[in-house]
């Protein structure tokens, strides 16, 4: 019996009854098997001789290649086992940016050996490295790992080895907290407030010790200015600063790994980011315009920048109207009149100190556009004339069109045809020497190309057949009109969408339909009509018969309006028949000329006359001995001969079979005693293969022909 999940079992009671094993013998086998399994199983991990207290910079040892349970997930969809179930539970009780406290439940083992603490930085199924080997005490189920990367992600697990069996914990993912993040707020000429974050979570055996604030001025080495023992404190105000000086500050966080007594040196310290700030100088202001040359109505952006003073700052603006209005440090403004315009910014800091600054811009009259098109609705391929003229602005003014379909006109006036249907907004833009741009657009609707669909009631007909012609229009701009037909036979053109026409001669005629849409686009469609006469091919036979005899007629036709053709036969004796192939009996002596009349699918007809058929006197009686009767008699004779041959062959085969049998015990069908064959000499039962009677010794007779 093989191991399952690290367990061994003795055979059941039924097995013990058959094998005769006692309970003592079962236990002996259990211990022996366990030792063999332990010696044969791969080691849980490569371990070091001493207990490790920090994660090495480079992991030279790796975990065994056997799969580990991944975050407690032991089964895949469908119930198939993927990883062995964890033997005991691993968790964590505390985290600092560079340390984590692991704890686990004590597994049930026989002959505890050691715990192996393993870590992976490549995912829960990645390569695990040995961090520490803890031996000698199965109840020592905690471990603190240090020297970890703040903000890093680690995957931890613990293996246990014992005299009987081994096991693994679940894998847990631990994301190390980030370092404390330091910021400053509202520095004054003599003080600044520092604020920080602390994302560590404390619990036995990791506890908080202190925050230490360091300060450096004008590039000097930073020194500690305060030590804070309250872990809930998140801010500190530095005082005694010098105005107009540059400072740096950072925060150190000290944590205790196994208690914070003075005799315990096991502590870790992490350093926050460094912040730089300065104490303010006297308040001053500068103001600039993004552009110093603009047009009327064109927005310009103004930036007001304070230096010195104490934030926060408030801003007010004067755009030449004699009063200040609140605003931000940047403000957009468009001037309604041309000429030189003055702009003033006033800044007030948190101490109510004020400072002002001014600048000016030159404002030109803004350019304007006059744009138009000769038509706003066209079909694909029809030209549009574009006109765009600019006035005002600062010369030179560049005018150009962007047409919306990828096409352009580099000047104000030009023509363009669109290649695809849709609604377009061609735009004209003008840009003057001050880079002031103005633009305008027009709306153009482009309809798909006008398409005509011409049809006829038939494309093949006989001369004189009246045909119906129809044309329909699609696409384009609608409002179809101007329908006109030409038929290719020099007849005058016909107006209208539905017309009729017939042809007097045979030929292939090209029929053309024309129409327009509301945009004036013209389209045409062409069809070809084949005008041909009905051609008849007819034949009959025989050319002469006796009175009462039957004559066969067949005919075919091509041309005209085409199939289906209607065939009418006039047999010359006052009767008619219908169909492409018919037969007709002639009862009276005489000469008859049959006529075939063919009508095509459109109702046009044509006829042809066949050669005369001669009908002679009535026929005599029909003889009984015909070729058919003779053939039937011959076949009957052959069948009778075949039956006789078959009977004779069966009889001959039976006689030959009896001759080959040799000697046989019975003399006849009556030599039977109690259902068995008996000897003909003595009447005693014998085997059929004997040559003499067993009981009387007389020889058996030969079979017939023997």
Image (cartoon, rainbow, N blue to C red):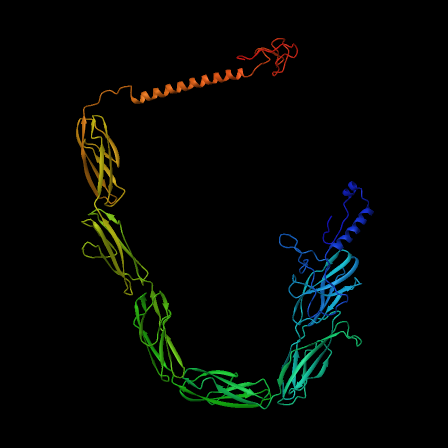
In depth, the one of 469 and 64 nearer the eye is 64
Res 270 quadrant in image: bottom right
Q: Indicate whether 222 appears above or below 644.
A: below
Relative to residue 66, is residue 637 drawn left or right?
Answer: left
Residue at image location 67% in from the left, 70% down from the top: 176
Q: Position of residue 47 (x, y in %)?
A: 74, 63
Relative to residue 173, is residue 587 drawn left or right?
Answer: left
Q: Indicate whether 227 appears above or below 100.
A: below
Q: Position of residue 550 (x, y in %)?
A: 24, 28
Q: Position of residue 75 (x, y in %)?
A: 65, 55
Residue at image location 20% in from the left, 30% down from the top: 543
Res 539 quadrant in image: top left
In depth, the one of 506 and 117 nearer the eye is 117
- Is residue 108 something that shows in the picture? no
- Is residue 563 something that shows in the picture? yes
Res 284 quadrant in image: bottom right
Q: How many marks?
A: 0
Q: Position of residue 64 (x, y in %)?
A: 70, 60
Residue at image location 18% in from the left, 56% down from the top: 492
Residue at image location 35% in from the left, 74% down from the top: 401
In depth, the one of 605 and 629 nearer the eye is 629
Relative to residue 362, is residue 416 drawn left or right?
Answer: left
């Amino acid at each position: 019996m093989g191991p399952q999940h690290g367990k061994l079992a003795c055979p059941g009671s039924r097995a013990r009854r058959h094998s005769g094993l006692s309970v003592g013998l079962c236990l002996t086998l259990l211990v022996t098997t366990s030792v063999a399994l332990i010696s044969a199983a791969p080691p849980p991990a490569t371990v070091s001789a001493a207990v490790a207290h920090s994660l090495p910079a480079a992991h030279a040892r790796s975990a065994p290649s056997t799969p580990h349970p991944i975050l407690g997930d032991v089964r895949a969809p469908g119930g198939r086992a993927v990883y062995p179930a964890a033997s005991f539970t691993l968790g964590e009780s505390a985290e600092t940016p560079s340390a984590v406290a692991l704890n686990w439940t004590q597994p049930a083992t026989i002959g505890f050996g050691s715990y192996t603490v393993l870590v992976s930085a490549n995912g829960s199924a990645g390569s695990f490295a040995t961090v520490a080997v803890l031996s000698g005490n199965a109840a020592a189920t905690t471990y603190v790992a240090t020297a970890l990367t703040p903000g890093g992600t680690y995957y931890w697990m613990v293996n246990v080895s014992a005299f009987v069996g081994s096991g693994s914990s679940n894998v847990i993912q631990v994301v190390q907290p980030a370092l404390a993040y330091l910021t400053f707020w509202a520095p004054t000429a003599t003080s600044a407030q520092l604020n920080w974050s602390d994302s560590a979570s404390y619990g036995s055996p990791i506890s908080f010790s202190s925050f230490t604030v360091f300060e450096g001025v004008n590039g000097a080495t930073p020194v500690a200015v305060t030590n804070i023992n309250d872990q809930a404190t998140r801010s500190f105000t530095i005082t005694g600063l010098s105005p107009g000086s540059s400072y740096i500050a950072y925060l150190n966080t000290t944590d205790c790994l196994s208690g914070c007594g003075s005799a315990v040196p096991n502590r870790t310290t992490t350093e926050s980011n460094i912040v730089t700030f300065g104490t303010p100088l006297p308040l001053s202001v500068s103001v600039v315009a993004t552009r110093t040359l603009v047009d009327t109505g064109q927005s310009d952006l103004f930036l007001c920048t304070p230096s010195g003073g104490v934030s926060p700052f408030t801003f007010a603006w004067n755009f030449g109207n004699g009063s200040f209005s609140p605003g931000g440090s940047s403000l957009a403004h468009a001037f309604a009149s041309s000429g030189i315009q003055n702009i003033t910014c006033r800044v007030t800091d948190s101490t109510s100190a004020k400072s002002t600054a001014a600048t000016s811009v030159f404002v030109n009259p803004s350019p304007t556009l006059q744009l138009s098109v000769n038509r706003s609705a066209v079909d694909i391929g029809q030209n549009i004339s574009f006109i765009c003229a600019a006035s005002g602005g600062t010369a030179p003014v560049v005018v150009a069109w962007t047409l919306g379909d990828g096409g352009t006109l580099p000047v104000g006036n030009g023509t363009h045809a669109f290649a695809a249907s849709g609604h377009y907004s061609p735009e004209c833009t003008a840009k003057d020497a001050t880079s002031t741009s103005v633009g305008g657009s027009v709306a153009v609707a482009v309809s798909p190309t006008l398409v005509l669909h011409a049809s006829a009631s038939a494309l093949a007909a006989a001369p004189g057949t009246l045909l119906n012609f129809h044309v329909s229009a699609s696409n384009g701009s609608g409002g179809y009109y101007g329908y006109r037909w030409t038929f290719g036979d020099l007849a005058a053109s016909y107006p209208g969408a539905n017309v009729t026409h017939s042809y007097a001669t045979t030929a292939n005629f090209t029929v053309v339909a024309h129409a327009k849409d509301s945009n004036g686009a013209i389209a045409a469609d062409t069809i070809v009509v084949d005008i041909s006469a009905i051609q008849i091919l007819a034949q009959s036979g025989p050319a002469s018969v006796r009175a009462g005899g039957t004559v066969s007629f067949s005919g075919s036709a091509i041309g005209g309006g085409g199939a289906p053709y209607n065939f009418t036969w006039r047999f010359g004796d006052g009767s008619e028949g219908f169909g492409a192939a018919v037969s007709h009996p002639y009862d009276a002596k005489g000469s008859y000329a049959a006529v075939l009349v063919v009508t095509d699918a459109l109702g046009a007809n044509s006829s042809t006359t066949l050669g005369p058929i001669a009908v002679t006197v009535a026929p005599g009686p029909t003889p009984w001995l015909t070729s058919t009767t003779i053939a039937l008699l011959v076949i009957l004779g052959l069948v009778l001969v075949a039956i006789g041959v078959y009977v004779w062959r069966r009889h001959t085969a039976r006689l030959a079979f009896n001759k080959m049998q040799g000697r046989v015990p019975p003399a006849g069908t009556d030599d039977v005693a109690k259902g068995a064959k008996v000897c003909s000499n003595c009447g005693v039962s014998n085997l059929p293969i004997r040559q003499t009677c067993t009981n009387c010794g007389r020889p058996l007779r030969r079979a017939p022909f023997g």
